[in-house]
Image (cartoon, helix red, strand yellow):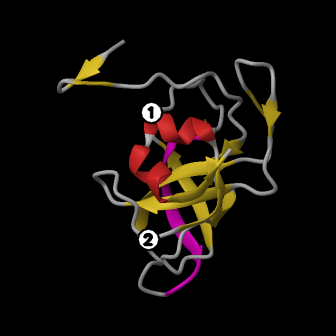
């Protein structure tokens, strides 16, 4: 596995990318933001003229679509924690959620809020342990 600064980076399983740029997501934390719009998917390498898309565990750049005025009109970092499209796991099970949701994070990877509402996919815990520690439920 690749190493970065002494720690082992987790490999992300292949998950279908279901959230394109421009999609509106629910905000799953208590920062005050209600809806988020996807602006960019970090680390996406795609094909010419194909919209970049994200899946569970991806690092996103978002803007606050509805919420407090102090959070709007600026680009923030987020992590996608739920998606409606089914996620297939190694053991053959499929997991799908009721909504598409993300959690706002700081540039160094710490969550901005103090709690996460709703379940979080298990794939997120491998890549973002700080987000997983705040989750009330991992599925």
Q: Is residue 17 above or below residue 77?
A: above
Callout 2 secondary element: loop
User: Picture coordinates of residue 73 (x, y %)?
Assistant: 45, 75
Q: Residue 54: tell me if it is visible.
A: no
Q: Which mark is residue 43?
A: 1
Highlighted range, magenta: 56-68
Location of residue 92 by image quarter: top right
Q: Is residue 58 above or below residue 69?
A: above
User: Picture coordinates of residue 9 (x, y %)?
Assistant: 35, 25
Q: Earlier in the sequence, mark 2 or mark 1?
A: 1
Q: Which mark is residue 30?
A: none
Mark count: 2
Q: Is residue 129 left or right of residue 101?
A: left
Question: Residue at image x 58%, y 49%?
Answer: 80
Give the residue number, with chain letter if any, for mark 2: 113
Q: Is residue 134 left or right of residue 108?
A: right
Q: Quick one: which residue is furthest to the left in this view?
A: 5
Q: Is residue 60 above or below residue 3?
A: below
Callout 1 secondary element: loop
């Amino acid at each position: 596995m690749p190493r970065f600064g002494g720690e082992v980076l987790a490999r992300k399983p292949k998950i279908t990318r279901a959230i394109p740029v421009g999609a509106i997501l629910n905000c799953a934390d208590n920062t005050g933001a209600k809806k988020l719009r996807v602006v960019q998917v970090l680390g996406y390498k795609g094909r010419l003229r194909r919209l970049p898309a994200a899946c569970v565990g991806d690092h996103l750049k978002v803007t606050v679509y509805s919420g407090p005025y102090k959070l709007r009109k600026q680009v923030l970092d987020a992590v996608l924690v739920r998606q409606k499209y089914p996620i297939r796991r190694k053991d053959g099970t499929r997991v799908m959620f009721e909504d598409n949701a993300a959690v706002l994070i700081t540039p160094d990877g710490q969550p901005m809020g103090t709690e996460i509402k709703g379940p979080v996919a298990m794939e997120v815990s491998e890549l973002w342990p700080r987000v997983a520690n705040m989750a009330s439920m991992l599925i």
